């Protein structure tokens, strides 16, 4: 815990974008034919993760479950594809997204030439009145010229990263705890100095330094560690190993947040390097394989 790392990222959606970007010229590109069945605002509204854009499949970002997205609201669409954030004011009409001219803005983080160029293609894609089609498995396909964007709801997208029941079993070292903010940002702390391990077997989940809070679970078809009727966790669980040292930093998550997280029927994702993410809507705990310590 002595190496606490604070992360604070404010996601730039429609209500919080900076660095205005010049709108693409007024001359309209040739548009594809409308979808055979118009997709309406209600079908498009809400959060969507990017499956692929122009053949590129985004990676899963460590510490955040949504690194590439297109989130639609009644005001327009909030965008990201692994680097900067953007927002485009507009609306869905007759199976197309129609941008309001001059409305696009974005953050200006430096992410390297390749990612920055992909950012610009992705953001400007929505200036081209893409056709929106509903395709198999509840996905959306957006087309503008030869560019294709494939989207999937976040709850469905994470299933592509769902590990098998045997993969999650074992002793795991805690690396990092992230808190997802309602504003769209997140903050986190490192846990490399916290003693003990998260232990998962076929039906039991525990933090081995506080056995009073062990629980039994069922691993569900959608990758959740479903608590099997254990008594409710106390409002203030007592676990000395997660309190020492105790940082007075209310803007950051606390190591004690691990206990309510594992009791909350969290989902599990497999990350690169053999790591796991145990998460709910509020927290994400990253684990790596560990020898007993």
Image (spheres, helix red, strand yellow):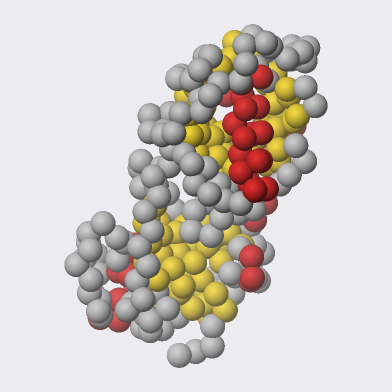
x%, y% of residue 43? 58, 22
Residue 258 at least partly seen:
no
Residue at image position (53%, 24%) is 22
Residue at image position (61%, 39%) is 119
Residue furthest to the bottom: 293
Residue at image position (61%, 62%) is 270
For the image, the number of numbered tags is 0
Residue at image position (19%, 67%) is 248
Seen from the viewer's position, the closer of residues 158 and 72 is: 72
Seen from the viewer's position, the closer of residues 279 and 250 is: 250
x%, y% of residue 106? 48, 34
- Residue 32 drawn above or below residue 110: above
Q: Quadrant of residue 60?
A: bottom right
x%, y% of residue 250? 22, 59
- Residue 248 drawn above or below residue 108: below
Name the image quarter holding the C terminus.
bottom left
Residue 233 at least partly seen:
yes
Name the image quarter holding the N terminus.
bottom left
- Residue 47 drawn above or below residue 41: below
Q: Quadrant of residue 183?
A: top left
- Residue 32 drawn above or below residue 249: above
Q: Quadrant of residue 4?
A: bottom left
């Amino acid at each position: 815990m002595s190496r606490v790392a604070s992360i604070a990222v404010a996601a730039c959606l429609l209500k919080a974008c900076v660095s205005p970007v010049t709108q693409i010229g007024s001359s309209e590109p040739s548009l594809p034919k409308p979808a055979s069945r118009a997709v309406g605002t209600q079908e498009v509204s809400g959060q969507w993760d990017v499956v692929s854009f122009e053949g590129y499949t985004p990676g899963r970002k460590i510490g955040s479950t949504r690194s590439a997205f297109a989130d639609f609201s009644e005001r327009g669409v909030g965008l990201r594809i692994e680097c900067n954030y953007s927002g485009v004011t507009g609306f869905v009409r007759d199976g197309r997204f129609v941008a309001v001219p001059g409305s696009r803005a974005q953050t200006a983080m430096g992410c390297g030439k390749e990612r920055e160029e992909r950012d610009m293609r992705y953001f400007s894609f929505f200036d081209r009145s893409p056709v929106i089609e509903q395709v198999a498995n509840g996905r959306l396909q957006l087309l503008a010229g030869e560019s294709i964007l494939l989207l999937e709801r976040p709850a469905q997208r994470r299933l592509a990263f769902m590990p098998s029941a045997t993969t999650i079993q074992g002793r795991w070292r805690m690396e990092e705890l992230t808190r997802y903010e309602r504003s769209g940002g997140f903050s986190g702390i490192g846990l490399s100095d916290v003693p003990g391990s998260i232990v998962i077997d076929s039906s039991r989940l525990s933090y081995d330094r506080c056995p009073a809070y062990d629980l039994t679970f069922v691993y569900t078809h959608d990758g959740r560690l479903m608590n099997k009727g254990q008594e409710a966790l106390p409002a203030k669980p007592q676990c000395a190993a997660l309190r020492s040292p105790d940082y007075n930093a209310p803007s950051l998550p606390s190591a004690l947040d691990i206990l309510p997280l594992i009791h909350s029927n969290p989902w599990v994702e497999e990350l690169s390097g053999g790591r796991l993410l145990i998460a709910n809507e509020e927290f994400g705990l990253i684990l790596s394989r560990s020898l007993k310590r």
